[in-house]
């Protein structure tokens, strides 16, 4: 059965160790931001949250747990910011790359960043944002078929997450 194209960002599944309780922390927003629940966000050099773009290659903070429209500077937003968090997200259509055989941190995939409809670009690995760690399920609970629009379990590459690596 073919998967349906329903890119709607990323949803929390569990953490790396299987704990299903997820904690979202409050962070201050950058002025003018419009962010949907499930969007990937990053921490600016001013210490405020902004929506990630396809070329955001570092300082990823996590996934928005709440949404905001046209934020005033400092408005709060809740973010799932655990670097070991596992999320469910959709893969790009028609990707030919095999996301389950990537063997290192450097073999990760990119983000397609559209507010409210972000997904994994498993056809590109320039910015290496996501590591695919398993199969996801469709909204009705059925298994997501391998191929176009597959729902996948992903984690942030530690090299791009703000809390993922230490010097």
Image: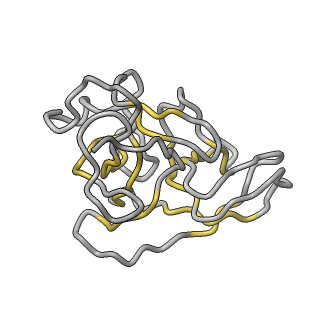
Residue at 18%, 34% in the rendered image: 104
**Quadrant of the image for the N terminus?**
top left
Q: Is residue 165 left or right of residue 48?
A: left
Picture coordinates of residue 84 (x, y %)?
32, 59
Residue closest to the far front:
1
Q: Which residue: 40% across, 37% down?
A: 129
Q: Is residue 129 left or right of residue 72?
A: left
Location of residue 149 in the rendering, given as x and y in whole percent from the top left corner: 38, 39
Q: Colour scheme in the image? A: secondary structure
Residue sitting at x 35%, y 39%: 159
Task: Tell me: 102 left or right of 120.
Answer: left
Query: Observer-nearest residue: 12 or 148?
Result: 148
- Quadrant position of residue 88: bottom left
> Which image quadrant is residue 2 in?
top left
Q: Where in the figure is residue 58, as x and y percent of width and height? A: 48, 36
Q: How many numbered marks, from 0 up? A: 0
């Amino acid at each position: 059965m073919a998967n349906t194209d329903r890119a709607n960002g990323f949803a929390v599944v569990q953490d790396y160790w299987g704990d299903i309780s997820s904690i979202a922390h409050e962070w201050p927003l950058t002025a003018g931001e419009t962010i949907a629940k499930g969007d990937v966000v990053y921490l600016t050099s001013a210490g405020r949250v902004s929506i990630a773009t396809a070329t955001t290659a570092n300082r990823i903070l996590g996934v928005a747990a709440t949404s905001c429209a046209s934020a005033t500077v400092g408005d709060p937003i809740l973010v799932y910011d655990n670097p070991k968090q596992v999320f469910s997200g959709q893969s790009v259509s028609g990707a030919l790359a095999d996301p389950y055989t990537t063997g290192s941190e450097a073999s990760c995939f990119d983000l397609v960043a559209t507010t409210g409809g972000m997904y994994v670009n498993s056809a590109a690995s320039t910015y290496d944002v996501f590591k695919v760690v398993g199969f996801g399920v469709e909204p009705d609970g059925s298994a997501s078929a391998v191929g176009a629009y597959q729902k996948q379990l992903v984690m942030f590459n530690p090299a791009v997450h703000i809390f993922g690596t230490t010097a």
